[in-house]
Image (tube, grey):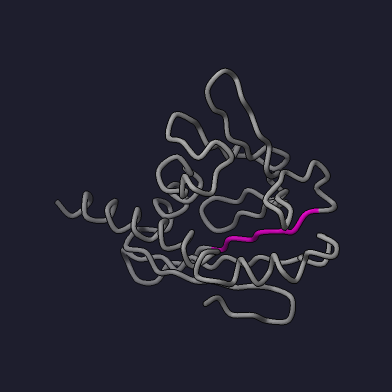
């Protein structure tokens, strides 16, 4: 379960990739994001983090479907990424970034070929009356532990390709 420091949730994984490769993989959501946590819940889509401050985070599916779910606040490869997490407690898109929670991802080398990836989810209080329930959900096994577990599994596969 993620650490709960006050109102924030913090989760950490160590992946067998250099910091540059770990950051590149993290921002390439098509390679690891759980499909069951997308709007379309199908593979025939694209999940995008535009690589610059002010960029959009969205998924695009068949027939031009597009769902914006975040905004890039800070893009500092390979060490830091901050997103306005524009998803409500009911998993609906929130069009107003100032009414959204925040995700900060920090990457730090952990040896020559490993990287510590720490994700902090904060600002739940901006979500209104459902904030506590959403925080509890994201702290549960079906929240950040599952999501970062998928990232770590993709990183392990990527790490195996490097050593072959």
Q: Position of residue 149 (x, y in %)?
A: 41, 63
* Residue 79 painted magenta: no
Q: Position of residue 84 (x, y in %)?
A: 72, 51
Q: Examine the image and state in which quarter residue 10 appears.
A: bottom right
Name the residue located 63 percent from the left edge and 48 percent from the top edge. Answer: 75
Taking the image as shown, residue 11 lies to the left or right of residue 8, namely left
Taking the image as shown, residue 17 lies to the left or right of residue 135, namely left
| 83 relative to 146, above or below | above
Residue located farthest toward the left when viewing the structure as drawn: 164
Name the residue located 51 percent from the left edge and 64 percent from the top edge. Answer: 142
Q: Position of residue 74 (x, y in %)?
A: 68, 51
Taking the image as shown, residue 92 lies to the left or right of residue 40, namely right
| 138 relative to 74, above or below | below
| 136 relative to 97, above or below | below
**Which secondary structure class fits the magenta region best?**
strand
| Count of numbered circles on the image | 0
- Which segment did they paint magenta? 100-106
Name the residue located 84 percent from the left edge and 53 percent from the top edge. Answer: 99
Q: Examine the image and state in which quarter residue 144 appears.
A: bottom right
For this rendering, which residue is in front, 124 or 111?
A: 124
For this rendering, which residue is in front, 23 or 140?
A: 140
Taking the image as shown, residue 163 lies to the left or right of residue 7, namely left
Q: Examine the image and state in which quarter residue 65 appears.
A: top right
Name the residue located 44 percent from the left edge and 29 percent from the top edge. Answer: 44
| 108 relative to 82, above or below | below
Q: Position of residue 103 (x, y in %)?
A: 66, 59
For this rendering, which residue is in front, 77 or 133?
A: 133
């Amino acid at each position: 379960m993620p650490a709960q420091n006050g109102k924030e949730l913090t989760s950490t994984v160590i992946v067998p990739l250099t910091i540059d490769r770990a950051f590149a993989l993290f921002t390439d959501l098509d390679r690891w994001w759980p499909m069951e946590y997308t709007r379309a819940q199908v593979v025939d889509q694209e999940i995008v983090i535009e690589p610059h401050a002010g960029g959009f985070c969205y998924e695009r599916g068949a027939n031009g479907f597009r769902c914006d779910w975040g905004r890039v606040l800070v893009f500092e490869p390979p060490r830091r990424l901050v997103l306005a997490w524009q998803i409500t407690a009911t998993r609906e898109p929130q069009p107003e970034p100032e009414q959204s929670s925040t995700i900060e991802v920090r990457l730090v080398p952990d040896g020559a070929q490993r990287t510590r990836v720490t994700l902090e989810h904060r600002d739940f209080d901006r979500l209104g009356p459902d904030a506590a329930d959403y925080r509890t959900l994201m702290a549960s096994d079906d929240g950040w532990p599952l999501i970062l577990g998928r990232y770590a599994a993709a990183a392990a596969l990527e790490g195996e390709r490097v050593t072959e």
